[in-house]
Image (spheres, helix red, strand yellow):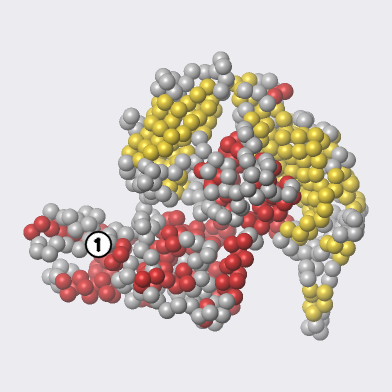
Amino acid sequence: MPLLRNTPDVGRGKRFQRSLRGLLLPGFMLPSALGALLIAFALLAGLGPGAARIARAQEAPTPAPTFDPTRANVPTAPPSARVGQSLYFENCAPCHGETGNADGPTVAELPGPPTAFSDPTVLWDLAPANLFHTAKFGRLEAMMPPWLERMDDSQIWNSVWYAWSLHTSQDEVATGQALYAESCAGCHGESGAGDGPDAAALEGGVADLADQSRFVLVSNEQWLQGWLASHPEVGGDWSVSEQTATIEYMRTFGYTAPWESAWQPGDGAIRGAVSAGTADGPAVEGLVASVDAYLEFDRVATFTTTVEADGSFAFIGLSTDPTLNYIASVFSEGISYSSDFISLTPEAPVADTSITVYGTTQDATVLTVDRLHWIMASEPGALQVVQIFAVGNSSERTFVGTDSASVPEPVTFAMQLPGNAQNIQFDNGVMGDRFHEVGPVIYDTLPVLPGEGTRQVVVRYVVPFEGNQATLEQEQLYPVGEMSLLVADFADLKVAVDGLTFQSIQAMGEQDYQFWEGANVEQRIVVDLDGLPATGDPSPFGATTAAATNSTGATTSSSSQSTVEGMAATTTPPPELWMAVLVAAVVMAALIGVLLWANQSGALRKGYSRADLNSLSEMLLDRIARLDDLHAIGDVSDSEWMKQRAQLKVQLVDVMARMKSGGRPA
């Protein structure tokens, strides 16, 4: 079937990073939703088992091994500097700097300056394999940690090539491309494979410039000397800048530069089957089907076709690059229905997928709140609150909303926040666009697909209070199946919640939280808090967690005691530093603990995983897209953009892996 459209490098930013394989073991039963929350928080905060291994590796006194080319494993596929960019910012930029100028924020703590990747003279005598070896095994005497336990070889190579690209530029490479095309391609070929039209006439053949096993071990200086020794008549009279530009271009035969499109056609194919989930639903023949290719979260290509009478569709000529991920979608009655993530590889170039489309309904009684999570933290005179609604649809039709005289489009899910809520913000939409406020009710306008938790709504707001007490009353407009509440704990705080049961106090990162939960919660929820800091009082989170230094320089311990069952609680830095990560942990906990681990064998609850995983990935992709929009218009700096992107991408790691493996850890 022909591809009707190919649009490379379209759409807003959506990145995908490595999976966290092995952090959760098949058959492991989480003790409770709280256990899942703690594991999810550890993963997101970098406190999981892998982090512990890294810490031990970095603390080991064993000297780093000297360079051994046999341990610089040659990449099995051309690395992508574009993929390596996020890895570089996360793991390398703190020392080497965002632009490779050796000016990262931790430089002052190092015994000497790190490598300046932006300086061509620094890299001139180094081969890419030297950088790979150092990144993998570290240089502990220079406080360079080994990354072999945190990144696999392909990720290290991607990071290395992004670091390498910092000393060159698209313009320099373009200059080298023109020189190569004029003087070198006749023998070496357009792609450097040694298959140019003049190659056959040469005795001994022509070197394959894309041969990774050879050229990753060669520095630019060695490459130049070998070039001039072999045929000085070509390029021997060029300027140094022309020779350098040509070498940098020839390097791109072995890797994809960050400014190049990641999409390359191949022999891959995706075959799909569309079925109707509603008996009298719309016909599937003629529906528009699309497939989007993502490199991490960057959409790099889109293809469209139409669905056949038997519900089938197909896309051919797709790349089998294993770093790419595909999502197939079908559009019916203005609603997009999507597949799980799909991967193609040279070993498995063809994949089958299925998509179910539904009829529509305007019956609002089909909506439920399957799970509701609250997170609260207090500052003098105000509560910071985050709520996460997992909205479900008990019917076999997609709920498209009802008409409202006050909103220009049909409204779907409705929520009523506490009456004194201020500074209301949504993580995956904005007021006046997706969300609309009508009196005390806020309406969503996105459709809700059939199933449990198919739509996620994350809302943040502030509730001011007077004195030392606060009461939050909220009318739930739908039945609430499960509810959890996390309250940042400190000395003298008292919490009472009608309909919820206090479970325990748990430390998450550097903050203790009271954990409450309940099932089939009454629709009117009241939370009473006493012992709060009044306006003008010091923040209860201003002291150091474990120790503080007095004016004489001596160290003194500090601690506090919780009023709930006498469990210990400590004071910490302000809780808003943890709120963003904790929100992601709560959402992931629902996937890891409540949804995915139904019994001791780790069996998946049927009907849960695809809807929840799709919903969560959609929410996170929306957040990344919104962040990219703010960065594009200059409202977010480059450094803050990359920092927030790195935080968001971690949340998608486990989701992506599970979507590929049917809900279980990959």
Residue at 40% across, 28% down: 313
Residue at 81% across, 41% down: 518
If the image is split into quadrants, where does the N terminus sit? top left
Mark 1: which amino acid? Leu
Near mark 1 (Cα within 10 A), the count class, few <14, some 14-19 or many ≥20, is some
Q: Quadrant of residue 351?
A: top left
Residue at 70% across, 49% down: 30
Query: For this view, does 498 lie left or right of residue 509?
Result: right
Q: Position of residue 221 (x, y in %)?
A: 28, 75
Label 1 sits on residue: 209
Query: For this view, does 215 lie left or right of residue 458?
Result: left
Q: Is residue 607 visible?
A: yes
Q: Position of residue 132 (x, y in %)?
A: 42, 68
Q: Quadrant of residue 577?
A: bottom right
- In the figure, 23 relative to 292: above or below? below
In-front residue for pair 616/74: 74
Residue at 46% across, 69% down: 135
Query: For this view, does 258 lie left or right of residue 104?
Result: left
Q: Position of residue 582 (x, y in %)?
A: 70, 52
Q: Is residue 475 visible?
A: no
**SS at circle 1:** loop
